[in-house]
Image (tube, helix red, strand yellow):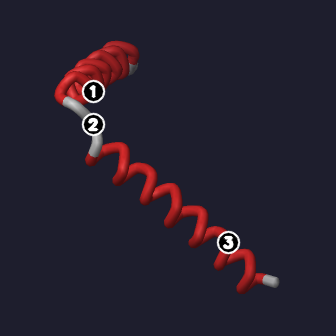
Amino acid sequence: MMQKFSYDVSRGLESFWKGVVFSVEHMSVTHWMILGSLSVIVGFLMLRTQRI
């Protein structure tokens, strides 16, 4: 039972990782610029909302 569960989880993670790798390998320059811009905006907003 536990062995089947761990096998299913590892298969799921493997297929997820393959999908991520495929997406990253096929991203165009525009996709990278959008991703970078969104990352900067989200990071800036997270820094602004922290209470120091």
- Find residue 16 and report its horizontal and vertical position in percent: 51, 55
Q: Amino acid at mark 2?
A: Met
User: On the image, numbered disc 1 is attached to which residue?
Assistant: 31
Q: Which residue matches tag 3?
A: 8
How many marks the image carries: the answer is: 3
Identify the element where label 2 is drawn: loop
User: Is residue 12 placed above or below 26 in the rendered structure?
Assistant: below
Label 2 Cα neighbours within 10 Å, binned few <14 / some 14-19 / many ≥20? few
| Chain-order first, disc 1 or disc 3 | 3
From the viewer's perspective, is residue 24 above or below residue 52? Answer: below
Q: Residue at x 28, y 42 (%)?
A: 26
Residue 35 in picture, x, y percent from top left: 29, 27
Give coordinates of residue 2: x percent, y percent: 76, 82
Tags 2 and 1 touching, CB below 8 Å? yes
Left or right, 7 with respect to 38, comes to right
- Distance from Cα at disc 2 to Cα at disc 1: 6 Å
Given this view, does label 2 or label 3 mark the residue nearer the observer?
Answer: 2
Q: Which residue is mark 2?
A: 27
Residue at image point 31% right, 20% down:
38
State whether residue 7 is above or below residue 50: below
